[in-house]
Image (spheres, rainbow, N blue to C red):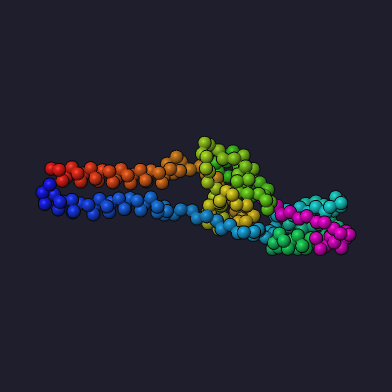
Amino acid sequence: MTVSRFGRIAALAPLVVAAALSVTGCATRHPEGQVPYATVSPGIVWRVEPGDVVKTRIYREPELSGEAIVAPNGQAYFAGVGRVAVAGMTLDSLQAEIASRYAKLVLDAAVEVMLIREVVVYGETRSPGVYPVDASTTVLGLLAKGGGAAGSGKSPSMTLMKADGRQLRLPREARVAQIDVRHGDAVYVSQDSFFARNAQNFTVFSTVVTVLVSVAYLISFVSR
């Protein structure tokens, strides 16, 4: 091999390396405009809103148990207690407030309070509609309420469409009540295409092909 060929290799080698690094970098870079994940809090973040349903169970007192819809003025009616302003309360404060009121009526009252909120589910789901969700319902459980994802996709994406126009991707294992889901929001179910699900694999394959082609061209060039 002549000195000139060594010079050609030295001149082309940086280009090959740069091409490989450029394509490899694309494999790890997040696509622009990717929908961010919603913030998942350690505990329940919901606060009572008009339209929510407060379900109460007073042990040994079935006539006092029942469901109360939170009115537009933020009040809900509870049997034996009357109207209570509950809007803005956390689940813990709601539990404490209702329990304290029934404690005045029932000796050693054991009170269980559940907050239920209706969430719209639409998109590529078998049964789009409005479904009740409580503090124990996960995002995946919400999808199951809608009959599961339509189509053949194995990993459907669930996006929270906020009333203010924001879009947030929902982690399927999180509980819905750990996320800021309010009335007026909706959950959109979509199926990623085969190419979208395997985008990273295609990028890695492209990297390998680029390097191999570059090396082959280099060998061909210097052997002339």
Q: Is residue 155 magenta?
A: no
* Number of numbered markers: 0
What residue is rendered at 41% in x and 46% in y?
Answer: 200
Q: In which quarter of the image is the C terminus?
A: top left
Q: Quadrant of residue 205?
A: top left
Name the outermost residue toward the top.
152
Residue 83 sits above or below residue 169 on the image? below
Query: What x and y, as percent, mark residue 78?
Result: 81, 57
Q: Quadrant of residue 54?
A: bottom right
Residue 97: x percent and y percent? Answer: 78, 63
Q: Residue visible at 48% across and 43% down? A: 192
Is residue 104 covered in magenta?
A: yes
- Considering every residue shown, the one lying at the far front of the view is 1
| 28 left or right, relative to 122 | left
Residue 58 in picture, x, y percent from top left: 83, 54
Regarding residue 68, the answer to whether it shows in the image is no
Q: Closer to the camera, 13 or 84? A: 13
Q: Give the range drawn in magenta.
A: 99-118
Residue displayed at 50% across by 55% down: 36
Res 32 seen here: yes
Q: Quadrant of residue 32?
A: bottom left
